[in-house]
Amino acid sequence: MKAIVLGGSSGIGRAIAESLRTIDCDVIAASRKDIDTSNLASVKRFIKKHKETDILVLNTGGPVPKQFSQVTEKDWQKYHNQLFLGFCILLQKLKVRNGGYIFAITSGVIREPNPRLVISSAYRLAFTAVFKLASKDLSSKNISCVNIAPGPINTDRMRELVGDLDEFAKSLPMRRVGEPREIGDFVAAIVKNRIKYLSGVTINFDGANSNFVL
Amino acid sequence: MKAIVLGGSSGIGRAIAESLRTIDCDVIAASRKDIDTSNLASVKRFIKKHKETDILVLNTGGPVPKQFSQVTEKDWQKYHNQLFLGFCILLQKLKVRNGGYIFAITSGVIREPNPRLVISSAYRLAFTAVFKLASKDLSSKNISCVNIAPGPINTDRMRELVGDLDEFAKSLPMRRVGEPREIGDFVAAIVKNRIKYLSGVTINFDGANSNFVL
Amino acid sequence: MKAIVLGGSSGIGRAIAESLRTIDCDVIAASRKDIDTSNLASVKRFIKKHKETDILVLNTGGPVPKQFSQVTEKDWQKYHNQLFLGFCILLQKLKVRNGGYIFAITSGVIREPNPRLVISSAYRLAFTAVFKLASKDLSSKNISCVNIAPGPINTDRMRELVGDLDEFAKSLPMRRVGEPREIGDFVAAIVKNRIKYLSGVTINFDGANSNFVL
Amino acid sequence: MKAIVLGGSSGIGRAIAESLRTIDCDVIAASRKDIDTSNLASVKRFIKKHKETDILVLNTGGPVPKQFSQVTEKDWQKYHNQLFLGFCILLQKLKVRNGGYIFAITSGVIREPNPRLVISSAYRLAFTAVFKLASKDLSSKNISCVNIAPGPINTDRMRELVGDLDEFAKSLPMRRVGEPREIGDFVAAIVKNRIKYLSGVTINFDGANSNFVL
């Protein structure tokens, strides 16, 4: 199977690419050079080049932390593209073959919005609504759509957000952050086992760290 | 108290304006001529002109129904402004006085996204995240933020969406759509009774029509 | 209109009873002597005595805080009656007249379960499911069902839970706990203004203190 | 690893037992003869006999469909044990070894309560709150707790609920019900891949059939 993993050069994206390779997927781990979802022209070039796939992983980094009062119009516009509109265009125009999978890697902030991550909280949540609706449409092609909302994971991004990761980890239920590989292996396991009926769902992946009941 | 009601010339907005007048608010019922939230320059002119208020009602109509596959980049951009970014700028720059209220009139589609209303489902939900975060910030000024998510209400919009309103009503638990006045009176009752601790909450207003548990 | 308020002798229940009296309801503020929902025989006697009402407020205190590991079978059984089954029997057998209202006073722990309040978190949430379903059934009689989930409110119960209320209040977004009167006035305002289309909804009443998006 | 699967003689439970065997777990597929969670004495005998495990799957059938108005006190009491209290006692007293897993198989009705399944909707949701809290406690032992909420799955139960399964399937997004094996393989894949950071989460498994956004 062919897989395209956006944001595939580091962090969670890279881990997913690596795990998919272990189950013999032919993986294109796209870096920002290959596709910059904040730039719609770049998104369209990417679609024209790659045309179709069996597995699509929608994944991208988030913005520098900012309080709501400091977010500029330019910030909104940029991340509207990066976290929402670029993904919508990919969903509309990059063909996923029948029986395929689409994974969206969003964030735990879609359920518990974070004041420093207001941009991500808003746009990743907006995309979650689109992705939920798309999951219904794509069901007729037996394409499964799974939204994974990571909590604290061991990435450069997390270090940027919390500073001392070891100190931060003590506050977590599992006394550690998650490993990107766990998400990668989770994604690969779903594909490998042909689990298709898992679709239209958002799965928090946070080591029991969130506080809402469901 | 001074109140600014956006989308105040018809439907739910007008009903809120009318109800607030009955409790002696000095109401500016802004029409699209006064402020068009899809046009950020118009939003900024409005802010410059009106400067501050005690009560702000963020309300605007939604787009023509469209399936996800048919939504164009231009549609996304326009309604990103109209349903999200214009409201964010108002939240950032229009001063709400201490002890005031902000009401956001969103839609039931923020919890149960609707395939024909994918644009509203996404951007109104994005704004819900911003509004939740803003409610925390604004608490220190004793400003209460209430998100009202209407279900089927007796407006021109609803007629446009469902066609025969009487026929549609038979499918609803209450055998009727809601009246705009009910939402108007609900808003006015909160203000009149100085109910301040109701903040940071999304209230579905749908006559028991939604199906999620909470 | 006739109103029956359970747990009406103190705290939120008393405040609701008082607010309903200001709008000329004929209020029965039932104390635990009148009805003890942990005792189903007491519930049935109460139903036999009072038969019907226009407004029913389902309200009762919660158990002493306990960690999950310490909850005994007897605790579960008692509070299953008090927080769930007694209310179910009231919903089934106490007649609420056409056009009436039922308010359930639950708790913010139904969305964000609290480790010290595991019993309340579970059974109040269970009742929320029943109440949601009942709201649909009762819509045909124009009876509105509103679930109010209070956050930190100025009651003896809250003092028991947090100790120093003033110190605790500093941690809250509004720098204060809510007043029972705010909930009382909210309930009375809904009734007085004949707001009927608000039904089947859970309204967190917590001064922007909760962290989930919706 | 040792696994105990309740309700393991048919349907989803049996499928989980079978999938776990393929990854070399030593599986006890308990039938109702072995443990009847509606009978607390039976639960305690089972605990005494089996003492501890690495993997525990909390799974049981639901009651015959009934409208709320028809549910008797005896029904509530029985299913309070079967769907809630028996599981709580197992969580409290059956030792799960460090690094283990607990899966709760609940139902899609915990998010979208079903009028014919009011008992399940209530008690399975109550257990979801307990399980969420337990997931935090158990994190310190590196035990992962995953709540799987199946939608329409190809079981005897589903046939009992909907009658003609083929006809019903046409109304579903995927035009089919899910297969028990998909859930079994999903559970086994999590265990086999040592995915531990997936904990404290409820995963709807419904082929894009549910309508809430998250």
Image: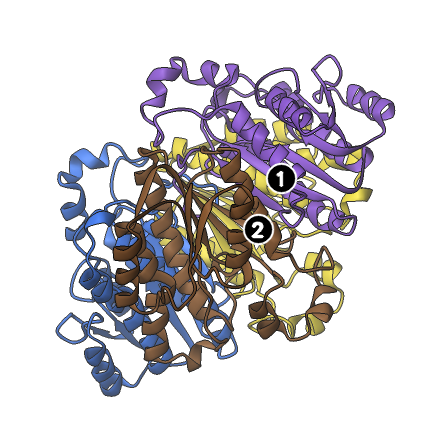
Chain colours: A yellow, B purple, C brown, D blue
Q: Disc 1 marks which residue?
A: B190
User: Which chain contains the residue that carries disc 1?
Assistant: B
Depth check: give the residue in front, D200 or A211: A211
Q: Position of residue C75 (x, y in %)?
A: 37, 76
> Share a chain, discs 1 and 2?
no
- In the image, B96 versus D94, the foreground residue is B96
Residue B129: percent from left, percent from top: 63, 43
Q: Position of residue A116 (x, y in %)?
A: 73, 52
Q: Quadrant of residue B30?
A: top right
Q: Residues within 10 Å of mark 2 (few under 14, many from 20)?
A: many
Label 1 crowd bin: few (<14), some (14–19), many (20+), radius 10 Å = some
In which quadrant is the N terminus of chain B drawn? top right
* Badge 1 vs badge 2, beta-carbon distance below 8 Å: no
- Mark 1: amino acid: Ile
**Disc 2 element:** helix
Q: Residue at x 22, y 46 (%)?
A: D67
Q: Is residue C202 above or below residue B155?
A: below
Mark 2 sits on what residue? Answer: C183
3D distance between C-alphas at marks 1 and 2: 11 Å
- Kind of residue sitting beneath label 2: Ile
Report the residue at 61% width, 71% height from top: C159
- SS label for mark 1: helix
Q: Report if residue D98 is visible in the image.
A: no
